[in-house]
Amino acid sequence: MKLPRRQFLLTSAAAAAAAFAGYPPLVFSDSKTSTHGKVKGTPHRLLVEKRSFEVNGRSAMMFRLQQPNGMRGLVLEPGERFLVNLEDRMDEATIVHWHGQTPPADQDGVNQFGIPLLQPGEQRAYDFAARPGTYWMHSHQGFQHQDMLSAPLVVRTADDVRADAQEVTIFLEDFLFRNPAEVFAELRKGETGHHGAMAGGVASMKPHGAMAGVKKMAGTQDKPGMKMDLNDIEFDAYLANERTLADPEIIRVAPGGKIRLRVINGAASTNFHIDLGSLQGTIAATDGNLVKPLTGRRFGLAMAQRIDILLDLPKNAGAWPIRAMREGARQQTGVILATAGAHVGKLANMAGTMAGPVTFDLERRLSALTPLKPRPADTHSTLKLTGSMQSYTWGINGKGWANRDTVKIRKGQRVLITFQNTTMMSHPMHLHGHAFQVVALNGKAFAGTMRDTVLVPPMAKVTIAFDADNPGQWLLHCHNTYHMAAGMITEVAYV
């Protein structure tokens, strides 16, 4: 493929920067041969574009991450490599992170370690072994993620094909008409509105999210005189597959059908409860990793987490809402599963009752189908999650990115990290480039599930374990976009 001069120069600059950082250069791929010399098919194209997007009758310019045919995101079939050409068709630079995947460090989609941003008109190739399961992709540049530069990433397995279940992906988002950078600036200045009264603005700094009379909850304890803060921002809408409950997506299903729900919390600053209504579901996977089956009707889902739920629909015709309820509030979104010809009633954007917080309730009951092999830990770090809503300064060990405490590890080690939350907000902590097992909650050891993002509730502790098998420098951060921007971010570096 012959490249235009501008694109050639940009590509050369990217390759030079990668080489300088000690990584092999990225190369374009437009043939059926991958950079590893194996024939794996034609690369998928992903386009980053701006588009007009309408919510509740009002339009705004947002981003979209899609294939040329208009499909948002990407689905890979069993055994297929992650072979992608990413193209920036916007008028600004970007970079896309393949959340939960474990690529070589130079293909992780962050620019903190010497990889340049993708410039307007530039293309970049990615080629690595895809990790099977339910994942997603999102910008790691500024607040682009909040402006919908994100999408599902599903890697199917042979078992998925054999199961012959209808696969339904639900992608959840919180939506702002306002510029998120302006909202962040208001948070930093301490400018507040009243909870529920300031659409697209900053929520009250008071403990608006706390349930009345709640002093202590599972997995948490209060500082004297303090209560939990559950939400930073009042959003204009909450979306499921880019739609609100005023006009939800209706997904046609067969009576008695088998469904695999792939629910992705792609929100920038919102935890949800997934409510199955009259249906009962069985959790099959968390963050793309298989778990021992666990049944229920309602499951907590933190920012950036994913959950696969298996459903057996009733044999009669009908309609079944799948709702996502914002924690600490009444707002909700969702989709509707409905058989052909079934009556589909209207659903309100507000639930009748306020949802409580997402806690350890589900986490302590989950266990990995394929856990880490038992072995002693070689290194154990404790990271304190610090900050407050009042100052809106967040950090790790009281530090931000510029003066971060790097977690230094060596290849082959069994690594333990304990997150000790000293704040009154929960923090979904995400480690790039690795899957980890949750092995202790509040100091109590257990064999939990495998994840890439774990929620640490207020004043709680979570310990994770992983094997150091993917050398490089990797981000470790809170996946609340605004907390990360305010300083809750560090790195795990192989030395």
Image (cartoon, grey):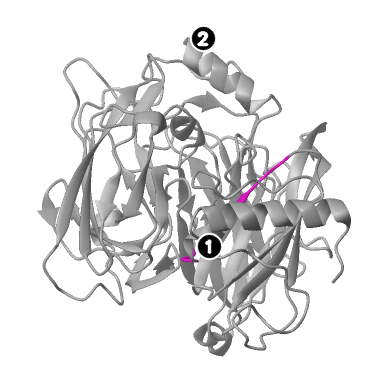
User: Of the residues under marks 1 and 2, which one precedes in the sequence?
Assistant: 1
Give the amino acid type for the residue marked by disc 2 in the picture.
Glu
- Residue 218 is at least partly visible in this image: no
Res. 135 mark: 1
Relative vertical location of residue 180 with respect to residue 360 in this rendering, above or below: above
The image quadrant where one finds the N terminus is: bottom right
Q: Give x and y (percent) for residue 101.
A: 49, 64
Give 191 or 475, whichever is nearer the viewer.
475
Report the span colored magenta: 93-103
The residue depicted at 85 percent of the width and 62 percent of the height is: 3
Res. 191 mark: 2
- Residue 215 is at least partly visible in this image: yes
Q: Is 348 one of the magenta-colored residues?
A: no
Give 432 or 2, whichever is nearer the viewer.
2
Query: Left of 130 or right of it: where is 383?
Result: left
Give the amino acid type for the residue marked by disc 1 in the picture.
Tyr
* Disc 2, SS: loop
Res. 334 mark: none
The residue depicted at 82 percent of the width and 32 percent of the height is: 59
User: What secondary structure prevails in the magenta region?
Assistant: loop
Relative vertical location of residue 383 with respect to residue 391 in this rendering, above or below: below
Give 400 or 153, whichever is nearer the viewer.
400
Disc 2 packing (10 Å; few <14; some 14–19; many ≥20): some
The residue depicted at 67 percent of the width and 37 percent of the height is: 147
Q: Give x and y (percent) for residue 150.
A: 64, 50
Q: Give x and y (percent) for residue 82.
A: 61, 72
Relative vertical location of residue 401 with respect to residue 248 in this rendering, above or below: above
Marks 1 & 2, CB-CB < 8 Å contact: no
Please give the count of numbered marks on the rendered protein: 2
Disc 1 packing (10 Å; few <14; some 14–19; many ≥20): many
